[in-house]
Amino acid sequence: MTAPHTWTLADAARAVKVRQISALELVEDVIARAQAVQPALNAFLRIDADLARAQARVADAELAHGRTRGPLHGVPMAHKDMYYRAGVPSSCGSRIKGEQPEDVTATALSRLDAAGAIQFAVLNMAEFAYGPTGHNYHYGHCRNPWNTDYITGGSSSGSAAAVGARATFAALGSDTGASIRLPAALCGVTGLKVTYGRISRAGAMPLSFSMDTVGPLARSAEDCALLLGVLAGHDLADATSSREAVPDYLAEITRPVRGLRVGVALNYFTDDVDPGVGTALTESVRTLEGLGCEIVPVTLPEMSAMDVAGTHVIAAEAAALHGAWLRQRPDGYSPQVLARLQRGLALPATKYIDALRLRGPSLDAFTRAVFDRVDVLHAPCLPIPTPTIAETDVGAGGGMDRTLALLTKFMRPFNYLGLPSVALPCGFHPNGLPVGMQLAGRPFAEGTILRVAHAFQQATDWHRKMPAL
Amino acid sequence: MSRVSQGYVQEVLQLQGVGRDPDAAKAIAPVLAAQLDAAAGAYDRLPFETEPAAFLVALERKA
């Protein structure tokens, strides 16, 4: 039998359900793995081993009496430390929040609890989820499981590193401007950015209320589908959560992909693409074609404008949300995050409102140009190979701003447009680190993009590759 | 195309009570403002709706 911590979430849930393994054995194995990789990766901020063991014993007792809470019964998970749990402090990757316990539990956590999941740890993240690299000057930088000299990507750095290292079956992340898909791509895991409003954000740390989304990072598209079925749906506690019906995502992903039209962009997503990245992306298109998908070239509308407008919205909303701390406790921020937040203070209100007013016309232009012609858009996650921690650290100089912009350039437009996009591994760069592709879809078409991702993962084994840690 | 003056940025930061090392904001604000003006110019007419709930309705209509 392979080590349980190497299983997928779906396999682990099945194994507990049929009592192939007890919840306690599973929790013990995953905690041992987490503790083993933590010195190299710094992915975990806190491991609640005794609490998880106690919950696992309860889960096993329930199973012994024939009771199952839900599809994640007895499965351990760790989450980005920005999902509030009543009575427990959440750092949000910062020191400013201190040890004050939260007074609410995030809806996302409540739904995972109700499905039977056991939270055993909280994960490292960029300070206030406002950084794309995985650097954290308060808790130490998170490190890429494929090579610890390299960045994990951010802001869901610990989530991607821990999933990639097989130290948690899956994790919640958040995606405001690439923060799930970027680290998923760099760490070789599958990350889902949902349609704006698909998953409740109640009890999750806000960064930009027009752009924030909650979503999973996991080892496969099937695992993401399993989690989305648990997490999606309207929530009275979040007025911006949608009442759109929640389909059976696990059933949707098993439908055939033959005949689906997959768009490949003729512009924007072709800019600045490194040859090593491009080779993996080209091969991934061939694989989709081999699965029977129809490959359709598409010309995109002006995308740079969407990237810029999205940057404005995040900057203005983040600065407003942090206004009190920026005035009263500026020394509590790292210099990089303080500088990013201060940019938003300098944006005139009229510019922020213009950026929001551009959103509807941009969505209309994009859906007409793309989704009137294809079912799914295929694109690179980022044009460049993974940079090192040193190359993107304070004082690295020499083009660092450009590198940081290129990290998010291909993903941020989907936040601005509110569209769903899944990132998944599609090969390796000559530097030995994973290369990621993304599949974007129409609003609320998570089932379709996960279906194509699942078919790709049935035909390839990139998502099964494990780093040698 | 508008420009945000350095003096304006300094004034805003003081109004906000943030006087600490505003160099990053000073440097980026005019660039961002000019970029957004260029982006807005791509469309003839912009809607008035700006709230997240209104955008959610736009997404649901496109589903």
Image (cartoon, rainbow, N blue to C red):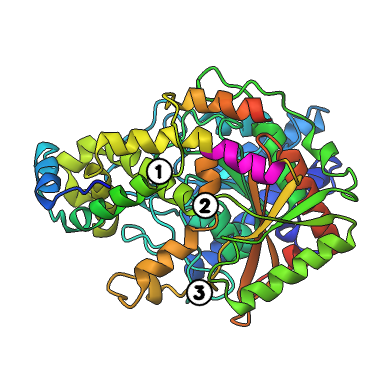
Tag 2 subunit: A
Q: Is residue A139 visible?
A: yes
Q: Which amino acid, mark 2?
A: Met
Q: Residue at x 73, y 61 (%)?
A: A6
Q: Residue A374: horizontal and vertical position, in percent?
A: 76, 46
Which of the image's four quarters has the N terminus of chain A?
A: bottom right
**Which numbered marker is on residue B41?**
1
Q: Which amino acid, mark 3?
A: Thr
Residues flagged by tags 3 and 1 on a common chain: no
Kind of element beneath mark 2 = loop
Q: Which amino acid, mark 1?
A: Gly
Q: Quick one: A363 or B25, which is closer to the camera?
A: A363
Q: Is residue A135 above or below residue A204?
A: below
Kind of element beneath mark 3 = loop
Tag nearer the camera, 3 or 1: 1
In the image, the segment drawn in magenta is A362-371
Q: Residue at x 55, y 51 (%)?
A: A180
Residues flagged by tags 1 and 2 on a common chain: no
Q: CA distance from mark 3 to mark 1?
A: 45 Å
- Residue B56 is left or right of residue B7, and the answer is right
Kind of element beneath mark 1 = loop
Q: Residue A219: horizontal and vertical position, in percent?
A: 70, 55
Q: Quick one: A44 or A375, which is closer to the camera?
A: A375
